[in-house]
Image (cartoon, rainbow, N blue to C red):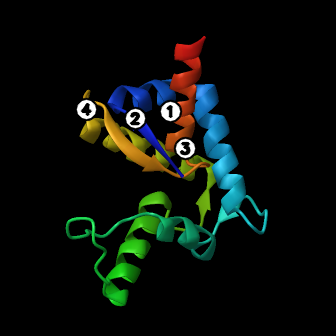
Amino acid sequence: MSVEILDGATIVNFLQDEEAFSVSVLNRFSHLDTDNDGLLSYAEMLKELQSLRVLETHFGIDVEPDPDELARVYESLFVQFDHNLNGTIDLDEFKKETKQMMLAMADGLGFLPVQMVLEEDSILKKAVERESNKVAA
């Protein structure tokens, strides 16, 4: 993990770079597709969903979530990706929903820079690296 500074424009610019975004999404999808069948099952996607901080904390102190509520949240998030509701997520569904979620993050961040802790292999980290490389060039 690393602490990075980004704003909404960092994300939007990354999404507009179709090649960079597509490569990052394909790499993430391939990492999650452990059985290499070209589809993500709920079990394969669950590990990714569990890495997200989807429930509120109180002033930075984690509160033990209700397991049933957490399961419903994960199922709901999975359905958000599974556009055709066939129980699996293909690359196109994964890419479309990832883009929608990132646009929502960009909208929420706005134009003021914020510091965020990012996982090294996350798509957001790739967006920051792309921006840093462009500034350095």
Q: Mark 1 or 4, which is nearer the eye?
A: 1
Q: Is residue 56 above or below residue 110?
A: below
In three-dimensional space, the C-alpha distance between marks 4 and 2, rounded to whole angstroms, equals 13 Å
The location of residue 31, given as percent across then percent down, is: 70, 57
First in sequence: mark 3 vs mark 1: 3
Check disc 1 and report the residue beneath it.
Answer: 128
First in sequence: mark 1 vs mark 2: 2
Check disc 4 and report the residue beneath it.
Answer: 110
Check disc 3 and report the residue beneath it.
Answer: 123
Q: Mark 2 or 3, which is nearer the eye?
A: 2
First in sequence: mark 1 vs mark 4: 4
Return the residue found at the far left. 59
Check disc 2 and report the residue beneath it.
Answer: 5
- Residue 18 lies in quadrant: top right
Q: Is residue 137 above or below residue 6?
A: above
- Residue 107 lies in quadrant: top left
Residue type, label 2: Ile
In three-dimensional space, the C-alpha distance between marks 1 and 4, rounded to whole angstroms, equals 15 Å
The 10 Å Cα crowd at callout 3, few under 14, some 14 to 19, many 20 or more, is: many
First in sequence: mark 4 vs mark 2: 2
Secondary-structure class at tag 2: strand
First in sequence: mark 4 vs mark 3: 4
Residue type, label 3: Ile
Residue type, label 1: Val
Secondary-structure class at tag 4: loop
